[in-house]
Image (cartoon, helix red, strand yellow):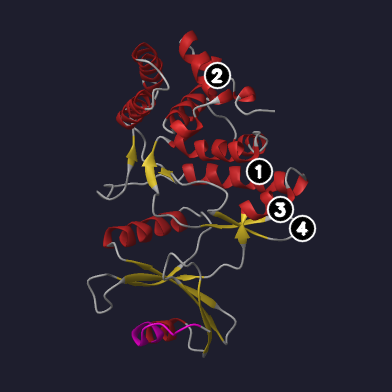
Amino acid sequence: MTKEPDPRLIELIGSIDASRITNVTHLKKERQDLLVSCESGRKHLIRFEKKHISLIHQKWAYEKMRSGGIPCPEIEAFVETEKDIPEGCMILSWIDAIPAAVIIGREGRNERSMKVCYKAGEVLKSLHSVQIDGPIPDYVFISDRQVAHRWSRRAAKSLLEHDLIDQAFAERFLALADECAQSIPDPVPHNLCFWDMHFFNIIVYDTEEPEIAGIIDVEETGVGWPMWDFTNWERWGLYYGDAWVRDPVLEAYGEIDMAMYRFAVMTRMAQHPEIFTGTIREQVTRAVDAQDIMAFDLDKLYPQ
């Protein structure tokens, strides 16, 4: 058992769970978050945040997800930074589950892992279907057509600075990117997007028939054009050297504009000079030279 949290937090936990605290443990070395176990059998996560804006952003995201029926932890208590406790925090219900990444990494491509990916695609579709009415807070990122233009230019600038492309290629890259960006609705619908959608932020029950237990680490949640969420699946494909996770995710998600999917993947990958090599470079070059995003061959994106 680690050092107990601030007595005021103990009192706060007592208002949630009147049973005796049996254990307190730190979850990560780089954070001060605490997992509090109680005699009742319940567990509570105390998530600390020094940045007030991050704290209220997470509160907004969890509330919007839960109101939209998206599985995620419940906020049991909320302490703002400006109040008595110097460091703001949330107390979240603890879900006894594991990251989807653990199952996929442990078991590789098998029927169970494919089901996990399929379930992830279903929950992503559900999340993208949650419409946010009313004003969007200033701290919530809105992904619109202008964001796509900025990210394309950031990618071209980064590749130029690393001497991976020349000016002529940069101009052709931006011409293709700008053409694709015109297909992004303007104004963009205010539907939820995660922006950090990868297999470590989706937790699943480690059972024979895996089910999604929840989405966690929601501090980047925003609204707008949803296609960027798919780019993290593709980066996972890089990790494994193939894209087998893509098929069950997209099958579960349903109808999708694959031209815009390609545009999102191409733009995000071009933003990272360290991976702009081999088959990724070949496919970006192929699409840019053809001035046709459909020439970006997803099936040949990763080395076989």
Q: Mark 1 points at which residue?
A: 118
Q: Give residue 109's quadrant in the image.
A: top right
Contact? badges 3 and 1 (CB < 8 Å): no
Alpha-carbon neighbours of circle 2 within 10 Å: few (<14), some, or many (≥20)?
some
Marks 3/1: CA–CA distance = 17 Å
Query: Distance between the Cα atoms at labels 4 and 2?
Result: 40 Å
Relative depth, front residue between 27 and 82 = 27
Of mark 4 and mark 3, the one earlier in the sequence is 3
- Count of numbered labels shown in the rendering: 4
User: Horizontal and vertical percent for residue 164?
Assistant: 42, 22
Q: In which quarter of the image is residue 158?
A: top left
| Screen quadrant of the C terminus | top right
Residue 281: % across, % down:
52, 22
Label 4: how many residues lie within 10 Å, few (<14), some (14-19) or many (20+)? few
Of the residues shown, which amino acid type is indicated by label 2?
Glu
In three-dimensional space, the C-alpha distance between marks 1 and 4, rounded to whole angstroms, equals 15 Å
Give the residue pinned by disc 2.
282
- Tell me how far mark 2 sits from mark 3, CA to CA: 31 Å
Q: Compare residues 303 and 50 and report the one nearer the observer.
A: 303
Which of disc 1 and disc 3 is earlier in sequence? Answer: 3
Which stretch appears magenta?
A: 2-10
Going from N to C along the chain, the mark reached first, 1 or 4, is 1
Residue type at tag 3 = Arg
| Nearer the observer, 101 or 165 | 165
Left or right: 80 in relation to 207:
left
Q: Name the residue under label 3.
A: 106
Mark 4 vs mark 3, foreground winner is: 3
